[in-house]
Image: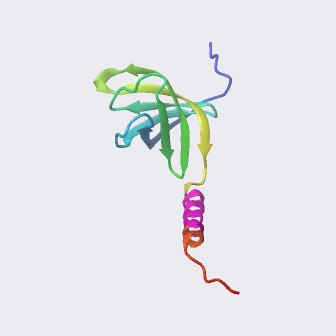
């Protein structure tokens, strides 16, 4: 019997997963399925339960925590991610950050005083 509140959509997309507790490089992972509250990743390495992660999926960045991680055949790890946040337009965020940094630099420059 299915106990999930939301349906999961099966997929064969790839994503970049970053452990937010460490300085490791992003890991390429397969995305087996996704729903509004979570996703299932197929990873080459084990991630500990409760590890916060970012998952870059196309132009979206999903933030969440590992809720399980089980080894499967062939050395692949199946990991569940309970999602906490989603950032859907990465390019818009980059542009906003650029404008904010430019405005900050502009504000830090000495200005000519008009008397």
Please tell me which residue lies in front, 8 or 82. 82
Task: Inspect the magenta stretch and tell me whether residue 67 lies in it.
Answer: no
Q: Nearer the viewer, residue 99 or 72?
A: 99
| 63 relative to 104, above or below | above
Q: Position of residue 85 (x, y in %)?
A: 61, 39
Report how many numbered discs are placed on residues in the image: 0
Residue pushed farthest left?
74
Which quarter shows the N terminus?
top right
Q: Residue at x 52, y 32 (%)?
A: 33
Q: Is residue 63 above or below residue 2?
A: below
Give the magenta part as a residue range. 91-104
Q: Position of residue 100 (x, y in %)?
A: 59, 63
Res. 17 image quadrant: top left
Pinpoint residue 114: horizontal percent, then vertical percent: 68, 86
Q: Residue at x 60, y 68 (%)?
A: 103
Residue nearer the viewer, 55 or 103: 103
Image location (x, y in percent) of residue 97: 56, 60
State the residue at coordinates (37%, 41%). 28
What is the magenta segment's predominant secondary structure? Answer: helix
Q: Residue 82, located in which quarter of the rendered image?
A: top right
> Does 89 sit above or below residue 31?
below
Q: Quadrant of the C terminus?
A: bottom right
């Amino acid at each position: 019997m299915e106990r999930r509140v939301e349906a999961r959509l099966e997929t064969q997309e790839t994503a970049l997963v970053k452990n937010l507790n460490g300085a490791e490089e992003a890991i390429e992972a397969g995305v087996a399925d996704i729903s509004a509250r979570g996703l299932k990743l197929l990873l080459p390495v084990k991630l500990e339960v409760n590890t916060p992660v970012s998952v870059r999926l196309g132009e979206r960045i999903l933030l969440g925590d590992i809720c399980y991680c089980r080894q499967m055949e062939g050395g692949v790890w199946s990991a569940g991610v309970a999602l906490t946040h989603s950032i859907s337009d990465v390019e818009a965020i980059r542009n906003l950050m650029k404008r904010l940094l430019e405005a900050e630099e502009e504000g830090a420059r000495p200005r000519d005083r008009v008397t």
